[in-house]
Amino acid sequence: MNRFALPNLGVGLGLRTVHYSHILEHAPKVDWFEILSENYMQTRGRPLYFLDQIAERYPVALHGVSMSIGSTDPLDFAYLSELKALRDRTRAHWVSDHLCWTGAAGKNTHDLLPLPYTEEALRHCIARVRQVQDFLGAPLALENPSTYAGFVASTMTEWEFLSALAEGADCALLLDVNNVYVSAYNHGFDAQQYLANVPYDRVVQLHVSGHTNHGTHIVDTHIGPVIDPVWELLGEAYRRSAASVLLEWDAEIPSFEETHGDALRARDFIGAEGPE
Amino acid sequence: MTDRLPLPMDGAASRITPFGERASATPSHVRHRVAEPAAESAPSRARTPASLSELQLWVLSSITEGEPSSTEVDRVLTPGPRLSARDRFEVYRAGYDARLLECLRDDYPVTAETLGEEDFAALCHAYVRAYPSRSPNLNLFGGHLTKFLLERSEIPGLGPISPFFRDLTALEWALVEVLHAETPAPFDLATLQAVPIDAWACARFLPSEAVRVRAFEYPVNAYYQACRTGDRPASLPSPGTSKTAVYRRGLKLWRMDLTPAMARVLEALLSRETLGEALGRIETDASDPEALAEAERSVMVWFREWVNAGFFGGVVLE
C-alpha cells in the first residue's frame, strides 16, 4: 500500500472514444478506467454524456497532459479549476499528469517536453507541485515521461530527479514502465537501475503500453500490444508497489475485447486476480 | 426542403466524427527525418541558455519556429547511443506539427479529404504558425481556421485556395461547436401547449446552445453530404448562397438546409425575438408575394420541426 492510502483498483484500461458504445452496451467487467482529463474539459456536450455514464458504473482516475508542471509560465488556475471540477464530477480516485512542460510564453506545443534535471528545475517543480496539491486538496501523481533528448545542463539522472521531487513536494508517482523502457533505450541507461531507485511507497499507479521501435530510437506511440520486456518491468514494479495497473492504447486501437485482453495480460506478470 | 443528416458515431463513419483522442502518446505518423548535416552556417541564436526559463524559450522557438543549427543544438542537448543530439531533437520538432495536424484532421475531415494529404498538411502548417495553441486544451484549437482562410487568399506551400474552403471549414467547425455545446434540455411540450392563443405573438423561446445557423456563399452542405456518402464530386461546387442549421439532438449531430425565409425566422427566434417579431421579418423582408404566402403557410410546419429538432428548450411569456 502506498503512503497516500490510495486503493489498488486492479487492472484497468484507458478510456477511449471508440470503445464508448461497447462499454455502455455490454457493461464489460473492467476493474477501472483512466480518463484523459482534457478530452472532457472545455466541453459541455457529448463527451461528458458518455463520461458521466461510465464514471457512474466504474471506478476512474484522471490522467492529464496539459498541467505543464515544469513550465516557467505561471500555473494556469483556470485549467486547474476545471480539472478539480472534473475530478469531483467523476469522483476520480486521483489525478495524474506528467513530469514535463508543454509550452512557455503562453504558447502550448501539446507535447510532453523534457526537463533538464537540474537543481533549479527541481526547486521550480517542487514549488509548483505543492501549489497544485494545495489547490486540489489531494496528492498529485506525476508520471515519468518518455524522452527522446537529454540536456547538457542536467546534473542528475531522471530517477534521482523524480525521487527528489516526490520527496520535496510530497507527491505521488505514476510509474510508466514502458516509458522507462523507451527512455532507457533512447538514452542508454539501464532500466533495472531506474526501477531499483524509485520510491515505491509513493507509486499509486503503473502504466504499460506499446511503442514503436525505429531501430535508432523508440517512440512512445501507445500502439500495442505490450512487448514482454515491458511486461517484465511491470511485474517487477508491481511486486514493489502493489499499485493499480493500467494499459494505454492510443492509435490503431483494436476492438474493446482485444484491448482489454491485452490489459489483462498484466495478471500473468503481477500474479493478481483483481483489486484487493 | 429539409435535409436532416445524422452523423453516426460508430462504425465506418467514425473517422469523420469530430471527436478524436487528445492523448499523451506521440503520433505514430510522425516523419522522423535524419537532420541534414549542414546548417553550421545557420545564424546562431544567442548564447547557451543559462536558466530554465531561457532554456524553455530556446526549445520552444526551435520547435515552433526556425530550425536551430547543429552547433546550437550540441550546446544544449546531448547525443544518444544511436542518434546525434540534432536527430534526437527532430523527434520533438516533427511531433509538433504531426500532433496538431492530427487534431485538425479530426475537426476538418472533409476539408482534409478534399484538399488531400499534402495540401491539407501545408494548410495546417501555415495555420499552426498563424494561430499557435495558447490553451491547455485542443478541443477549440481549430476554431480560427475559417478566419485564417478569410485573412488570406494564398497559403504558403499551397498557393491560392478557393473561397469554398471558408464555407467548408465553417460548416465543419459548426459541427464541432454543437458537439461540445451543452446537451439541450428536452422541451416541455405541455408548457408549449398551455400557451394561450393570444399570447403566442409575445412568446420568446429559449434557444438550445447546440444550434448554429450558418450562411454560405456555396452549397456547402450538399457537398459535405456527398463526401459523407462516399460520392465526392470531382470538382468543387460553383458559388451559390445557402443557409444551414447545424444542431445536436441527443447524441447525434444533424444538418438542416434552410430557405432564406426559414433562416430569417429561425435566426430571429434564436436571438430571443418574440414570435411576433420573428414572423414580422418575413413580412418586412419578403419582396416576392408568392414566397411570402408560402412562408406564411409553412411557418407553423417549420416551427413544429424546430421544436422537435430541439432548437428550443422552453418558452417565456411576457
Image (spheres, rainbow, N blue to C red):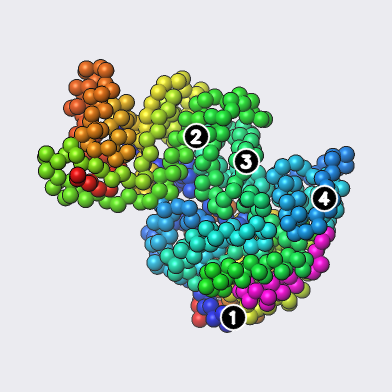
In the picture, measured across the screen, residue A228 lies left or right of residue B277, that is right
Question: Residue A27 or B109: which is nearer the viewer?
Answer: B109
Chain assignment, label 1: A
Magenta run includes residue A161: yes
Q: CA distance from mark 4 to mark 1?
A: 41 Å
Q: Measure the alpha-carbon separation of dots 3 and 2.
A: 15 Å
Q: Which residue is mark 3?
A: B128
- Residue drawn at x 58%, y 25% as measured from the top left: B153
The residue nearer to you, when weighing A29 against A146, is: A146
Q: Secondary structure at mark 2?
A: helix
**To which chain does the residue with label 4 belong?**
B
Going from N to C along the chain, the mark reached first, 2 or 4, is 4
Residue lying farthest left? B197
Q: Residue at x 57, y 30 (%)?
A: B151
Element type at marker 4? Answer: helix
Discs 3, 2 touching: Cβ within 8 Å = no
Q: Amino acid at mark 1?
A: Asn
Q: Position of residue A221 (x, y in %)?
A: 64, 55
State which mark lies toward you, 3 or 2: 3
| Mark nearer the viewer, 3 or 1 | 3
Q: Give the class, few, some or many, for how many residues have Cα within 10 Å of label 1's Cα (few <14, many ≥20).
A: some
| A76, above or below A136, in the image | above
- The residue that mark 1 highlights is A2
Between B63 and A190, the residue placed more toward the observer is: B63
Q: Viewed as shown, does residue A138 lie left or right of A126?
A: left
Callout 3, which amino acid? Val
Quadrant hosting residue B148 = top right
Helix, strand, or loop for circle 3?
helix
Residue A184 seen: no
